[in-house]
Image (cartoon, rainbow, N blue to C red):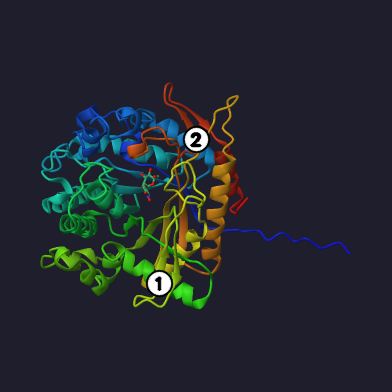
Amino acid sequence: TAASAAPVELRFPKDFRWGCATAAYQIEGAVKEDGRGPTNWDVFSHTPGKVVGGDTGDIATDSYHRYAEDTQLLKNLGVSTYRMSLAWSRIFPEGRGKPNQKGVDHYNKVIDNLLANGIDPYVTMFHWDYPAALPGGWQNRDTAKAFADYAGYMAGQISDRVKNIMTVNELRCFTDLSHKVGIHAPGLKLPDAEVNQVRHHGVVAHGLAVQAIRAHAKAGTQVGIADNTVFYVPVMETDDHVAAAKKATREMNAMFLTAIMEGRYIDEYLTQEGANAPKVQPGDMEAIASPLDFLALNIYAPEWVRADDSPRGYATIPHIPSSPHMASPWLIVGPEVAYWGVRQVSELWKPKVLYISENGASADDPLQNGRVDDADRVMYLRNYVSQFHRAVAEGYPLKGYFLWSLLDNFEWADGYSKRFGIHYVDFKTQRRIPKLSAAWYKEVIRQNRVV
Ligand code: PNW
């Protein structure tokens, strides 16, 4: 007899929120307009040898001028939300002092345009571009205070319309990639003690900003962080490996999310760092642990881990050349990280509300006969979204998903050589062309299920 095939549909809850994400320096351009001050990334990208091809964000996708066109791309997709960031140096060109009204006006126009089109903006206060005038950048503790003042000020300006605010994007990137690995602005390779201090300033900045936003924002404003927690995926789904992976995730993020959620640096981290551990001032840990309304995760590549009988109980498994990856070599494909990330933070810290603030992929994106058939990106996205669906179906509090990115943009040290968009951008004409992945995402949203 013929099998009666009843397809299992991976449907999301009715109120699940679909969106796209971008960041100011990666899309805006207009770096000298309306009083914007120079940033760390302007300096870095204009330093020969720092960015592939000598690319800069001077023009990027010109979204400072084309924001209304970008809103129409979002509207055509059918998203209900859009995650964007504000450029600190448009508001405070020198990092502090007197606000620049033209910068505030610009973001008011962008926000109003989104709302007029039925799209709810989620705003990140800091996505890596800070005013170059701030002495010492994140090496200087005063930057944390300046950041909180800026974040509080802008929360006061926008929270009548913006209901969800994120403090910073990806602590690990703007601390470690910028001050330890040296591939992001300002391009430093500092010794361990100084790196740990920069990390500490990062989490303090987040905490002080939470307090400042709450002090200035309209009651009810939801405050969170967009973190790229490193998630450890158990090599197999058995109790011992599952427990080992959760322990690894908690310990390996000790300087970032674990500190924020637990209000202290755990012993494993302090012991490991010894004399290089960060210098903490009274009140710092209380600020860092400021309660959050939601937690947002940027989830891309997995780490793999297995249980073992070492004292800590786990061994990480390095990526090897045969690990499948997308166009960026670091972007290992491991869709299960989407499920385990949501499950692990839920079990470890019980956040009330979770979002995926970024997930997406770089691909080669050949433009042929006016089309970009990025079937590889569609495959990547379908697999990750299916794993997020599993987390939702099991009851974890995941409420929304922001796809990185709405359009190809300035991919940091990779310049324009790596494309993450679901809209192709011709950087000569600034023409936007929806890729196959945009058609796929539109259908996911329309049917509210994996297609
Ligand atoms: C994120 N890694 O960065 C950022 O938030 C975006 O601005 C960026 O464009 C996007 O992901 C794609 O790269 C990351 O090396 C950069 O693991 C590097 C890593 C992870 C995230």
State the mark number for residue 143: none
Where residue 133 sits in the image (x, y, percent)?
A: 13, 38
368 vs 292, left or right, is: right
Nearer to me, 113 or 410: 410
**Measured along the vertical axis of the image, is residue 360 above or below residue 282?**
above
Amino acid, disc 1: Tyr
Q: Which residue is mark 1?
A: 314
Q: Image height check: is 207 above or below 34?
A: below
Amino acid carrying label 2: it is His
- Residue 43, can we see it? yes
Q: Is residue 146 left or right of residue 358?
A: left
At x 51%, y 58%, the residue is 15
Residue 70 rendering spot, x and y as whole percentages: 43, 34
Q: Between marks 2 and 1, how big is the CA–CA gap?
A: 41 Å
Tag of residue 423 = 2
**Residue 24, percent across and down?**
32, 39
